[in-house]
Amino acid sequence: MDLLKTDVQDRDGWRVVTAAGQLDVATAPEFRQTLVEAQYGGETHVLVDLNEVEFIDSMGMGVLVGGLKRARTHQCQFVVACSQPRVLRVLELAGLAHVLRVVPDAQAVTR
């Protein structure tokens, strides 16, 4: 059983990385690799869609911070789409909701 499923698509000038399942200590390395590959070349705006993520821990949040740092290094946008109350609450408690640009869904950015 996969704890995390990911998908990467190009949509309207954005690289959309969708995650589903659990983003935790067990799956963070895989997700980090997916995100690094999605950002390869550094010229890509990235949207990480967490709307199907059921759980995120500090390792998962660390991957998001790493993605944000890579994007800033290349003057690219890095946006997180999330409307999952549990995940949003964790991002808020960690202070990341104020550091990351968080939108309710991917369409808010890729229209």
Image (cartoon, rainbow, N blue to C red):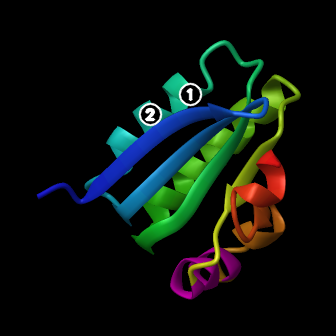
Q: Is residue 81 above or below residue 86?
A: above
**Stretch of the chain drawn in magenta:** 85-92
Provide the residue designation for mark 2.
34
Asked if residue 107 lies left or right of residue 20, the reply is right
Residue under label 1, please give it: 38
**x, y percent for residue 7:** 44, 41
Residue 62: image x %, image y %? 54, 53
Q: Of residues 1 and 69, which is closer to you in this image? A: 1
Instruction: State the image coordinates of residue 28 (x, y, percent, origin top left).
Output: 38, 50
Identify the residue at image location x=32%, y=58%.
25
Horizontal relation, residue 9 to residue 27: left or right: right
Q: Quadrant of residue 83?
A: bottom right
Q: Is residue 10 left or right of residue 36?
A: right
| Residue situated in front as seen by the camera: 34 or 92 | 34
Task: Tell me if 49 is positioned left or right of 108 in this view.
Answer: left
Q: Is residue 5 visible?
A: yes
Q: Are marks 2 and 1 in contact (CB under 8 Å)?
A: yes
Q: Residue at x 68, y 46 (%)?
A: 47
Kind of residue sitting beneath label 1: Ala
Circle 1: element type: helix
